[in-house]
Image (spheres, rainbow, N blue to C red):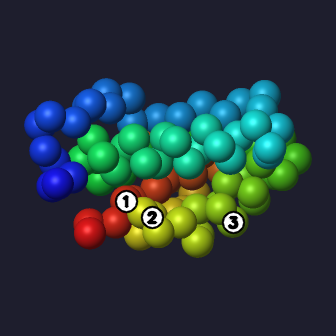
Amino acid sequence: MDRKDSTRLRLTNEELDLHRLTVDEAIPKLDKFIHDAYRSGLQQVWIVHGKGTGTLRRAVRHHLSGHPLVAFCATADRFHGGTGVTQVRLSDW
């Protein structure tokens, strides 16, 4: 089935907020969000993890770096949250 098939649920929010979650709580939510975004045909999403100690940011980026649906991830530009947000480009499969 084509990833842009109109029968699939469309994700309307391109941002996932993981503030105040532990790494163990955040990773399953991140996985679900990435899969839903991909199935919805989104090309780019943002993961809000905050600045804090950097533990959640590092875990999110480490997880995304090996994710099969992720083509690229990096710090968002200052207009999208800077170091408190990770920008994700999804694969084109």
Q: Position of residue 47 (x, y in %)?
A: 56, 43
Quarter the N terminus occupies: bottom left
User: Horizontally, is 21 left or right of 33 in the view?
Assistant: right
Q: Is 17 drawn above or below residue 43 in the view shown?
A: above
Dot 1 amino acid type: Leu
Residue lying furthest left in this view?
A: 6
Structural crowding at the residue carrying mark 1, measured as other residues with C-alpha within 10 Å and reported as few (<14), some (14–19) or many (≥20) = many
Structural crowding at the residue carrying mark 2, measured as other residues with C-alpha within 10 Å and reported as few (<14), some (14–19) or many (≥20) = many
The CA distance from mark 1 to mark 3 is 15 Å
Residue lying furthest right in this view?
A: 53
What numbered label is drawn on residue 70?
Answer: 2
Q: Position of residue 60 (x, y in %)?
A: 67, 54
Of mark 2 and mark 3, the one earlier in the sequence is 3
Dot 2 amino acid type: Val
Disc 1, SS:
strand
Q: Position of residue 13 (x, y in %)?
A: 38, 29
User: Horizontally, is 81 left or right of 4 in the view?
Assistant: right
Residue drawn at 79 percent across, 45 percent down: 23
Q: Which residue is mark 1?
A: 90
Q: Which residue is mark 3?
A: 62
**Toward the viewer: 84 or 31?**
31
Residue drawn at 59 percent across, 44 percent down: 30
